Image (tube, rainbow, N blue to C red):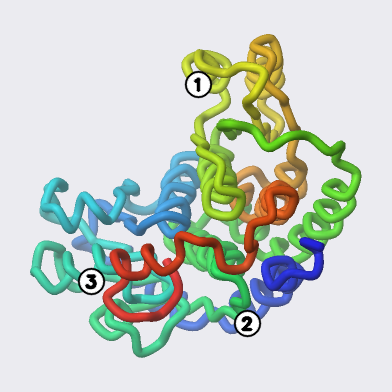
Amino acid sequence: MWRETGLWADVRELPASVAAALDAADGFDETAALLSGPDVRRIVASGNGGAYYVALALWLAAGMGPGGGPEVVAVPSGLLAGGWFRFRPGDRLLAVSSSGEFRDLVEAVEAGSVPLPYAAVTATAGSTIECAAGARALQPVRHQRAVTHTQALAGGLAAALAVWARISGDAGLAAAVGGLPDALARAVEGAEAWAQGLEPAPAPAAAIAFSAGPGWAAALEAALLLKEVAGIPAEGVDAREGATSAMYALGASHLALSLPVGDPSEPEAERACAETGARVVRCPGGGEAEPRLALATTLPAGCAFAATLAEAAGLDIDRPAWVDAYYRTARRASAEDG
């Protein structure tokens, strides 16, 4: 059963793992100081996969805050490694990589194509990214039994937003991040009960996942979970895209996964997708805390849903078939993280 997998054991530890990272706050103040120095005009947050979604969530959270601190932008690390992003005077890089060994970020740093010093959010002390950083916020992972990242993703979000709350003086965000472990405990419990009550259905041929505002990062992660755990082609979009262009090719063999955070566009997207004949599933967790935390609070349900589909298809939930090929191309070292 999927509830007995390493993936779900990792998910159950999310509250404790995030609480430990926040209690230690290892390097949070130093990272905030580096990113808010008098010469810093823009923070360029970058990563790959789930780490990029943390960067994206940071950008979205900064845009919703009271306005203190430098401008924030989120850039996929491949653009940095490929030389496609032009840094400006006053830019400071925030590299997000739990392993600290993701090839694109390492290559960009070693090529001298990023401004120094840079800051990092990572789970791995002594990694290439951590050692070369001028400051780093450490978010240690208690366990990673499955290949799919859970504690690293939630901890990375907590660290990035805690650092941003220090930079911007956003007391509301600081309080919300402090309450994330409790919100995750509710989300884990709710996700398990919700997934057990899902009606059996054939695996979809393809899927979209959508949410509004800061939930967009959560939709991207939900789509990634469908791909990496259940082997289902999936796209993550903003809810308004879900109600317009993302539903163009949907039909009876497809899935639309909704991760609501309370925006009026979300029910509209659900209706538009249902009218195509697609199966529409509403995923819980987005209402467990401040919407800027949706990337973490929807993660338990996203994992549970993807795992139920994978189990029905007879797939290895903890170590999918793509793993070896991925690590041959994505990592500088053998550390299994993103």
Mark 1 lies on a secondary structure that is helix
Total marks shown come to: 3
Q: Quadrant of residue 275?
A: top right
Instruction: Give the camera-side residue of 169 and 53.
Output: 53
> Dot 3, crowdedness within 10 Å: few (<14), some or many (≥20)?
many
Which callout, 2 or 1, points to the residue nearer the camera?
1
Mark 2 lies on a secondary structure that is loop
Q: CA distance from mark 3 to mark 2?
A: 24 Å
Residue 214 shows up from this direction:
no
Residue type at mark 2: give it. Arg
Q: Is residue 330 left or right of residue 55?
A: left
Give percent across and percent down for residue 207.
58, 32
Tell me: residue 301, above or below residue 270: below
- Judging by the rendered image, the residue that carries numbered circle 2 is 142
Residue type at mark 3: give it. Val
Residue 51 shows up from this direction:
yes
Residue type at mark 1: give it. Ala
Q: Is residue 193 left or right of residue 274?
A: right
